[in-house]
Image (tube, rainbow, N blue to C red):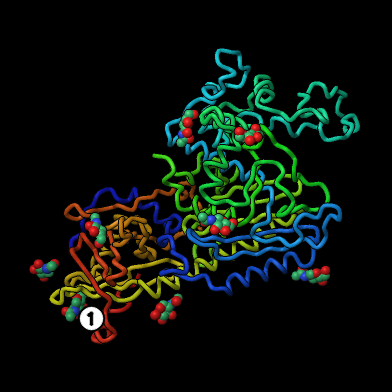
Amino acid sequence: MRYLPFCACVVGVVAAKCYDPSPAFPVPTWGKSGPILPRSAFEAIEQLVENAVNGSFKTSSFSVEVTSNTDTLWSYHRSASIHDKERPGVTKVDSESQYRIASITKTFTTLAILYQHAAGNLSLDNSILDHLPELEGKDYGTLPMKDITLRILASQLSGIPREFAFADVLLVGVDPVDFGLPPVSKSVLNPCYSQPGAPECDRADLIHELVKMKPIFAPNQQSTYSNLAFDLLGLAIETSTGLNYSTYIEQAIFAPLNMTFASLETPPNDDHAVLPVGGNYWGEEESVQRPTGGIYASSSDMSKYLRYVLTHYNAIAKGINWFMPASWSTGMNTFYGMPWEIARSNKILLDSNRPVTLVTKGGALPGYFSIIVMLPEYGLGVTILVGGDSNLMPILEEAITVPLIRSAEAAIWKNINATIAGAYIATNPSLNSTITLESSPTSGLRLTTFISNSTDFLHDILPLIAGEFLGSDADTPYRIQLTPTLLYQNETTQSGEIWRMLLMSDHVKGKTNVWEYFCHTDVDPLSYAGLPINEVVFWHDEGIVELPAWKLTLRPAEAEERREGLIVQGRGDL
Ligand SMILES: *[C@@H]1O[C@H](CO)[C@@H](O)[C@H](O)[C@H]1NC(C)=O
Ligand SMILES: *[C@@H]1O[C@H](CO)[C@@H](O)[C@H](O)[C@H]1NC(C)=O
Ligand SMILES: *[C@@H]1O[C@H](CO)[C@@H](O)[C@H](O)[C@H]1NC(C)=O
Ligand SMILES: *[C@@H]1O[C@H](CO)[C@@H](O)[C@H](O)[C@H]1NC(C)=O
Ligand SMILES: *[C@@H]1O[C@H](CO)[C@@H](O)[C@H](O)[C@H]1NC(C)=O
Ligand SMILES: *[C@@H]1O[C@H](CO)[C@@H](O)[C@H](O)[C@H]1NC(C)=O
Ligand SMILES: *[C@@H]1O[C@H](CO)[C@@H](O)[C@H](O)[C@H]1NC(C)=O
Ligand SMILES: *[C@@H]1O[C@H](CO)[C@@H](O)[C@H](O)[C@H]1NC(C)=O
């Protein structure tokens, strides 16, 4: 067999040294035709949570829910054992108990902006100035607002200050001079937030303060968290819809999603209120700052919301995948989206170095700590709402999300092993063509034998051409791994699930050179007669596998055919 001079494919190859491909499996349909997250997985998480809490946190209540794209799979509620005697609020929390979700509100504000963008009422790339008619033709100070778009605000890239009416030492209720600060009069601050009993800060107050502010960074240069950015987006929503922020969010999001216990009007009555003892912000009016942190909601509301977001994130507005990062933060693996806090970690999976993507938004107000975590690859969303001690949140995050992902991963591979892995034989009996697919949590779904019309491709052909794709890594073990494209031959019926085969080097550890970190993604290396040579299509209902470029249709081999040696196991040596 002659060496086949392909293109300069080695460029795409560097990918082989990088992390395993994502996605590694199609988004599971939990508990239906797909894998099952066993009750024992959730019992194990409950045990971890109980061990971690271990009788402490007596003044804290929390609610946790895990939802799939379609159903709530698990909920867990724990009630504080100590309550305020005068005003206990709800003493037995459940999925209808209301918490302040604080900054998770920013995701609702962004969704509203996306809706207005999709409706053509505004553009994400409009300057915020276009939506502040108060400033039209006026001097708007030193913030470069002409260049600050709605997209930049939502992406934490505006470079404007973090706060409008919080976080000034003058408001803390201590004598600043005791801290070595020079004496100043409180009257330098806007009375709307510096004087007890003064009216709440409104739109006019915000605009009034805005024109005095200085930028931290130039727009679109460097991310830095800003609450004020979302107050401004709230104003843009009001200008665009002609409704106040709360009314629009209720009409456009809470009502259609049937978020029965969600509210922006302060405060909802105490029937479902989680009221931790000690200082808390229940009933603290945020007025013009509602768009940055004003929502009250229950865990069942959040599961409804997560199901919607998980199934619509790439279909809300043309050209926008809502889960994509927009900027990096200071971390190596953390990013800001609009306004997501996105992490990619390869520490979660025990058997694979494949990174898991967590699309999250956290929130905190005195007495209330919250996070939503979406795992788009797994079709899972997690809500954690705490009323009480802030130290609970990191404990719960770790105890819940990490085992959940590991259990989901195990269930998925078990399901793929049972439904896809195995030996397949050409439907055309005159053709000596067979494949074997194997799966494992370590290296995913792999092609381990491939005989095409009596040619043993993996054994006799691949070693001759592997160097073209893998460079020097062709000298170390490699494999052919399949990655789903999340597309179907027939999108209407969601049948004919399309995957691509990738030549992957096992060489991933011991990275030393800087350029080894440069990972390309390239899953379309070569075609044959115009068809992608690495395409594999699964027709699950029919039990058929197709390799279109090879004009090959295969069915599962019967045990008997395997005994007859039609399938030569383990020949690939991959
Ligand atoms: C739980 O608390 C008890 C007493 O407060 C302590 O002895 C025990 O070690 C704790 N268990 C764990 C798992 O932390
Ligand atoms: C677009 O704006 C108009 C005018 O403010 C409003 O009547 C309409 O409801 C908005 N459309 C959507 C989808 O919000
Ligand atoms: C928003 O508008 C609604 C309907 O007009 C009104 O009932 C509500 O009080 C308004 N809320 C605020 C904060 O202005
Ligand atoms: C809305 O949610 C409530 C529970 O909060 C439920 O009883 C009701 O059936 C839901 N309505 C619809 C239309 O799904
Ligand atoms: C995969 O399935 C095969 C055959 O059904 C079984 O023997 C094997 O133990 C399974 N492996 C895993 C990891 O589940
Ligand atoms: C199979 O290979 C033979 C040569 O060995 C060739 O004549 C024939 O066309 C091939 N058939 C298919 C379907 O690939
Ligand atoms: C099919 O092809 C393989 C690889 O060339 C060969 O080992 C095997 O004997 C062939 N089987 C049949 C039934 O011809
Ligand atoms: C998809 O499947 C449906 C139902 O079998 C069929 O009517 C339709 O023509 C198919 N679409 C394509 C693009 O094959």
Q: Is residue 59 above or below residue 31?
A: above
- Residue nearer the viewer, 391 or 268: 268
Q: Is residue 428 above or below residue 26?
A: below
Residue 227, position in %: x, y? 65, 35
Which residue lies at the image location 46% right of the left edge and 59% below the top edge?
Answer: 508
Disc 1 element: loop
Which residue lies at the image location 74% right of the left edge and 33% below the top edge?
Answer: 166
Residue 337, position in %: x, y? 53, 42
Residue 571, position in %: x, y? 30, 75
Quadrant (top left/top right/bottom left/bottom right) for the C terminus: bottom left
Quadrant (top left/top right/bottom left/bottom right) for the N terminus: bottom left
Q: Which kind of residue does numbered mark 1 sit on?
A: Leu
The quarter holding residue 328 reads top right
Q: Is residue 509 visible?
A: no
Q: Is residue 446 visible?
A: yes
- Residue nearer the viewer, 186 or 76: 76
Which residue lies at the image location 63% right of the left edge and 51% below the top edge?
Answer: 261
Mark 1 close to ligand 7, CB under 8 Å: yes
Left or right, 398 with reference to 496 = right
- Residue nearer the viewer, 568 or 202: 202
Q: Which residue is mark 1?
A: 566
Q: Is residue 508 above or below residue 363?
A: below
- Residue nearer the viewer, 335 or 170: 170
Left or right, 205 with reference to 181 = left
